[in-house]
Image (cartoon, rainbow, N blue to C red):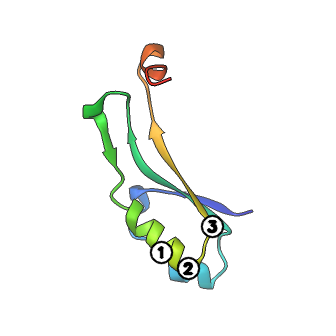
Amino acid sequence: MKVVDVSSWQQYINWDLIKANDDVDGAIIRVGWGTSYDDECGLDSQYDYNIQNLQRLNIPYDVYIYGYAETEHAANKDL
């Protein structure tokens, strides 16, 4: 399968062109990022645009939150 990982770093993706060219079988979409501290988290500015277009074009997708911890304690904080 050809699956792409996309976020705001790719800016606006032309999903219609990708669908027409049969370039991907699916996508994983970053919806947010951050550490375990509330003030260091954010929403990806393109997640809504990407999900709406993937749904409209019936392209399979899943989502993830990119997390990064600076200590082992922070990584296990919400477990």
> Few, some or many C-alpha atoms within 10 Å of disc 2 (few <14, some 14-19, many ≥20)?
some
Cα–Cα span, label 3 and label 1: 11 Å
Secondary element at tag 2: helix
Task: Tell me which corner region of the image, top left, top right, bottom left or bottom right, holds residue 26.
Answer: bottom right
Cα–Cα span, label 3 and label 2: 9 Å
Of pointers 3 and 1, the one earlier in the residue sequence: 1
Pointers 3 and 1 in contact (C-beta within 8 Å)? no
Q: Is residue 61 left or right of residue 44?
A: right
Q: Which residue is mark 2?
A: 57
Cα–Cα span, label 1 and label 2: 6 Å
Extreme-right residue of the structure:
1
The answer to whether 37 is drawn above or below residue 12 in the figure is above
Secondary element at tag 3: loop
Q: Is residue 57 left or right of residue 71?
A: right
Extreme-front residue of the structure:
79
Q: Is residue 38 left or right of residue 78?
A: left
Pointers 1 and 2 in contact (C-beta within 8 Å)? yes
> Few, some or many C-alpha atoms within 10 Å of disc 1 (few <14, some 14-19, many ≥20)?
some
Q: Which residue is pictured at 43% across the width and 25% down the height?
A: 69
Q: Which residue is mark 3?
A: 60
Badge 1 amino acid: Asn
- How far from the left and from the top, in percent, is residue 56? 51, 79
Residue 53's tag is 1
- How far from the left and from the top, in percent, is residue 49? 39, 69
> Few, some or many C-alpha atoms within 10 Å of disc 3 (few <14, some 14-19, many ≥20)?
some
- How far from the left and from the top, in percent, is residue 1? 75, 62
Badge 2 amino acid: Leu
Extreme-bottom residue of the structure:
20
Q: Which residue is pictured at 31% across the width and 27% down the height?
A: 37
Q: Is residue 4 left or right of residue 71?
A: right
